[in-house]
Image (cartoon, rainbow, N blue to C red):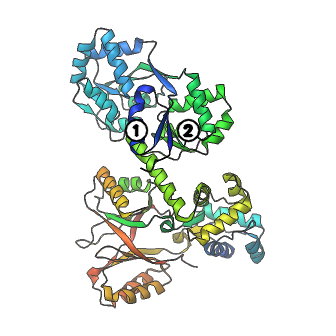
Amino acid sequence: MSLKDKVVAIVRPPDQVKELSDAIESLGGTPYVAPLIEVKPAKDQESLIRLIEDTASGRLDIIAFMSQNGVRQTFESAKNAGLETSFKDHIKKITLISIGPKTKHELEKIGFSNVKLPEEYSSFGLIKLLEKTDLKGKRIGLPRAKGVDDTLRVSLEKFGAKVMEAEAYEVKETSNIPLVNNLIRDLISEKIDVIAFTSPSTVRSLIENTRKFSDLEKVKASLRKIVIASIGTTTKKVLEEFGFEVQVTPSEFTVKALAKEIESYFEKINNLTNLKGLDKLDFKILEALQFDFPFVERPWDYIAEKIGIDSQNLLSRVKRLIEFGIIRKIGGFPNLKKIGFTASTLVGVKVQQEKLEEITNIINDCNSVSHNYLREHKYNLWFTITAKDSNEIQNIIKSVKNFGISDEDILNLPAIKSFKTDVRFTLL
Amino acid sequence: MRNLENIPDDLDMELMSFLQAGIPIEADPYREISEKLGLSRQEIISRLKKLHEGGIIRRLGASIVPSKLGYEANGMVVCEISSDKISQVGEYIASLKEITHCYERKTIPNIWNYNLFFMIHGLSKSSVKEYVSNLMKKIGINKFEILFSVKELKKASVMF
C-alpha cells in the first residue's frame, strides 16, 4: 500500500479510466480523473468502410487491431454499413492480431477466440510478430486512430506487405475547459503527486491546453516537482521531446504494470528517504555524478547548475554522501585492458569453512585481486583478477590450490565477451 | 609531442593515477594536479578528453555502493544458453537498467556449464528472485542460478 496519500492524475478518456483507477486505489492511492482526450468515431468513414468491405469480401489476409477503441469503432461501423455478419465471418478465416491483452479481450467479447498477441505490446512488438511469417504480397488491414504516424505501415511494407490503414476513430483534445483548468491549477499547487500519461495524445493535449489557458513554462516547472509516469516508450519519447523527465515507465506496456511501477517508485523513494534522511535532490546528485560528470575545468559548477542548486550546497552534499559511504569514489574509470592489464578472470572456489579465513587472506593480499565475495553456493568464494601478465593468474590459482583445493573445486572462468561492464547504478 | 597512436604517455598515466585516487571535492578540483604536473587546467582537460575518446577512460564520475542505499541483495546470476543465442540474449540483458555487469565466460565441461553471467542489485532477495525468474521465463532459459553475496571480502581499484 505504498501509494497511500498519493494523488495520481489519470488523463485517459472517461471510458478507459476504470482499470487504472481501480489499480491505483487497490495500492492505496487516490485517483484524480481528468480526461485530457476524447475519442470519437472518425468523421470521414471512407477508409474504414473500404477496409470493412474488403474484409467482408475476402480480400484481406491479416487484420490487426491497435486499441480497444479501434475494435469498438470498427465493428460499430460494420454494423451501420449492414456488413456485420460477413465482416465477422471473414475475420474468423484470416489472421487476427491484437496489440495487447485489453484489445484482445475486447475482441473476445464479440466472439473471436483465435486472437494472436505480440510478445511486447507495442507497434514494435507487432512488427516482431509479423516478420516471422512471409509477408510478401500479404494484405494487412490496420484500423487505427486518425493522424497516427506511418512507421508501422512503412515497416510492414518493407517486408512486402500491402497495408490498408483505415481511420476508425479520432482522438481529440478534450473540450471540457473547466476540467483542464482545474487540472493545471492542481498541478501548479502540487496537489497532484503523479501524472500518468497513457498515450502521446494525452501529452499533446496537456501541452496545447496549457498554451491556450495558462503559462506553459510555469506548468513545466511544476511538473518537474511531481512524478511523471508513462505507459510505454512511445509516450515517454514524446514527453522527453517536450523536455520532461520521465521517472516511471513499466517494462510491460499495460495499465496494471504502470500502477505497479508507480508503486515501486515510491517504495524506493521511501526506502532511500528513511535510510539516511536523503531527499530527492540527493538522488538527482547521485544520478548526475554517475551519468553526467563532464570533462570541464570546473565540473562541480557545471553539475550544480544542471541540478539547479549552488555549488557550495552541491559540494557539501557530495561530501555527506561520501561520509555515509554511499559514494565510494569520484574519479575516472579506466579501461584496464587498454593500459596493459590484459589478463583477467573470474575465479570460483569451493572452500570449506575452516579454510575460508586463510584463503581469503591470501587472495585479498594480492594487488591484482579487485573484488572478492563470499556467496551462497557450493562454490562459495568468488574473486576477480586483473593483471598485466597471465602468469599472475596462474600463480594465484596455484597458491589457492596449495590449501588442498582440488582441480574440480576451483573454476577459472575468463570472459569471452563483455556485454556490459558499467558499474553505474540506476536508483529509481 | 604527443605520439600519434594515442598510447598514453607518462603525463597521461600521472593523470590516470590522479583519477584513480579520486577527483577532489573542491570548486577548482584540478588545481593541485595542475601545479604538480606543470600543466594548465585546459591542457589537463584536453588530455582527459583524448583519453576518453581513445577508450582508455570509460567515463568520469562516481561509483556508488548499492548496499548503502538499501539495495542489500546482490546477486550474481549464472545461466546456460546455447551458443547461437548468447549474443542476442547478452545484448538484451545488458540493456536492462537493473543489470550492472554482463559477460559471456568460458565453461568447464561437466563441471561448470553456465556461460552467461550478470549482476543484479535489489532491495531484497525475494524481489531479486522474482525479477530474475520473470526475466528467465521471458527469455526462455531454464538452467540458471542466483548466487547471492553473503559478504564483500574485498573491493578495490586496481592501482598503477
Q: Is residue A42 above or below residue A66?
A: above
Circle 2: element type: helix
Q: Is residue B48 left or right of residue A92?
A: right
Q: State yes or no: discs 2 and 1 in contact (Cβ < 8 Å).
A: no
Neighbourhood count class around disc 2 (C-alpha, 10 Å): few under 14, some 14–19, many 20 upward: many
Residue under the image location 36 percent in, 64 percent down: B125
Which mark's residue is nearer the viewer, 2 or 1? 1
Q: CA–CA distance between discs 2 and 1? A: 18 Å
Across and down, in percent, residue A251 comes to 41, 46
Crowd tier of the residue under label 1, counting other residues whose Cα lies within 10 Å: few below 14, some 14–19, many 20 or above = many
Position of residue A89 measured from the top left corner of the image (x, y, whole percent): 21, 18
What residue did someone put label 1 on?
A: A255
Res. A60 mark: none
The answer to which quarter of the image holds residue A75 is top left
Q: Secondary structure at mark 1?
A: helix
Residue A29 located left or right of residue A220: left
Residue at 35%, 33% in the rendered image: A99
Q: Which chain letter goes with mark 2?
A: A
Depth check, front residue: A271 or A393:
A271
A313 or A353: which is nearer to us? A313
Image-quadrant location for residue A70: top left
Query: Measured along the vertical axis of the image, is residue A69 above or below residue A282?
Result: above
In depth, the one of B49 and A33 nearer the eye is A33
**Disc 1: host chain:** A
Q: Earlier in the sequence, mark 2 or mark 1?
A: 2
Q: Three-letter amino acid code at disc 2?
A: Leu
Q: Residue at x 57, y 27 (%)?
A: A180
- Label 1 sits on what residue type? Val
Tell if the residue under mark 2 belongs to the same chain as the one under mark 1.
yes
Query: With B142 as the anchor, is A338 left or right in this view?
Result: right
**Numbered circle sitting on residue A239:** 2
